Image (cartoon, grey):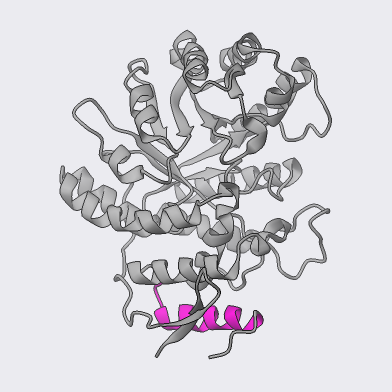
Amino acid sequence: MTIRLPGADGRLRSYEPRNEPLGLLPAGEPLASRTVFSAAHVVADPYADVSPDTPAAVDWDATLAFRRHLWSHGLGVAEAMDTAQRGMGLDWAGAAELIRRSSAEARAVGGRIACGVGTDQLTAPATLHEVRSAYEEQLALVEESGAQAILMASRALAATAAGPEDYLDVYGHLLRQAVDPVILHWLGPMFDPALEGYWGSGDLDAATEVFLQVITAHPDKVDGIKVSLLDARREVELRRRLPDGVRCYTGDDFNYPELIAGDELGFSHALLGIFDPLGPLAARAVRVLDTGDVKGFRELLDPTVELSRHLFQPPTRFYKTGVVLLAWLAGHQEHFAMVGGLQSARSLPHLARAYELADGLGLFPDPERAETRMKTLLALYGVTS
């Protein structure tokens, strides 16, 4: 059997899907040598009468089922993240409900969860006091839910701060009142252009120094940092300067195998969007790494980088479209609808290539179902077999 896929040049070509999946990847205990979070996507309710201008409608059963899938393989879930759905269709009210529901589900099944804390309830230009208050409101909710907090970058703070001192003041205030150590998230402008110049400077070297000031002033309140700059060299240099006990969680969806494997001076843990579609395979790779087999780890994970780089190509913030496509093709949900209508954010050739790369990796438990669903999508665009 073959399927006709459109290429970047607009021409159709034949592709022969693989007959067998990679193999059933069994569930397992939590991972040992690395702490690994998947920034999980939200499943939209396709039957709700909503538009991109109205609050999102979420299929809670399917959304929580996907989180149980990730937990069953020993991965943690990074919930309500700026890189997964917030700021791209899911508002603060929806994110708050997601935090409550997912945290309760994590307690019920013994899953690890960390939740994003931001300021996206602010809809107009804000003062620094209002930014702090918005952060505090979200931090209180996450702590009350029993989840670990991830202090995310704030569009409102980026727009309001006059310089590095304002960042030091806001983050210092939040860290002093945090009950438990948090993860600090530095999200680059390739994911969100509104965060250009975060930490008070467009110079990444100067911004890094401010970021490190925040950490070194409160090392007992920082569990770790998540770096999403897609710059492996900079991440390695940064993690070597962290205080003892502060972890680095890579958010680099371009270079994650080498960063997680590490070197003689250290390694990165992981908090990655690409581990949404790669969850079981990523867990298998880390279990190999748990035995000390770096070569075996790289042999499993290196081939996935081409798919990840494809999904995260510019505009990087639309990577979720490919992630949800793969979740649908893999059978984790029954439709290809997205919060905010973002299923239209990538072209058909982009989606076709995502299917081809994922199929080549054996990511679909039922390749025949994936092929049938991909042909359905192609038919909607006028491609007939």
The residue under the point 51% across, 52% down is: 313
Quarter of the view holding residue 54: bottom right
Q: Is residue 130 left or right of residue 354?
A: right
Give x and y (percent) for residue 14: 43, 84
The residue under the point 49% across, 48% down is: 273
The answer to whether residue 32 is visible is no
Residue projecting furthest to the front: 9
With respect to residue 152, does 54 lie above or below?
below
The answer to whether residue 375 is visible is yes
The residue under the point 62% across, 69% down is: 336
Q: Is residue 255 magenta?
A: no
Q: Is residue 376 magenta?
A: yes
With respect to residue 113, does 199 lie above or below?
above
Q: Nearer the viewer, residue 48 or 258?
A: 258
Give x and y (percent) for residue 32: 27, 41
Q: Nearer the viewer, residue 2 or 91?
A: 2
With respect to residue 155, does 339 lie above or below?
below
Magenta stretch: give its range. Answer: 364-380
Chief secondary structure of the magenta span? helix
- Indicate the quadrant containing the N terminus: top left, top right, bottom left or bottom right: bottom left
The residue under the point 38% across, 80% down is: 17
Give x and y (percent) for residue 166: 66, 12
Q: How many discs mark residues in the rendered view? A: 0
Give x and y (percent) for residue 56: 75, 55
Q: Nearer the viewer, residue 243 or 223?
A: 243
Quarter of the view holding residue 79: top right
Q: Nearer the viewer, residue 310 or 167?
A: 310
Q: Is residue 135 left or right of residue 227?
A: right
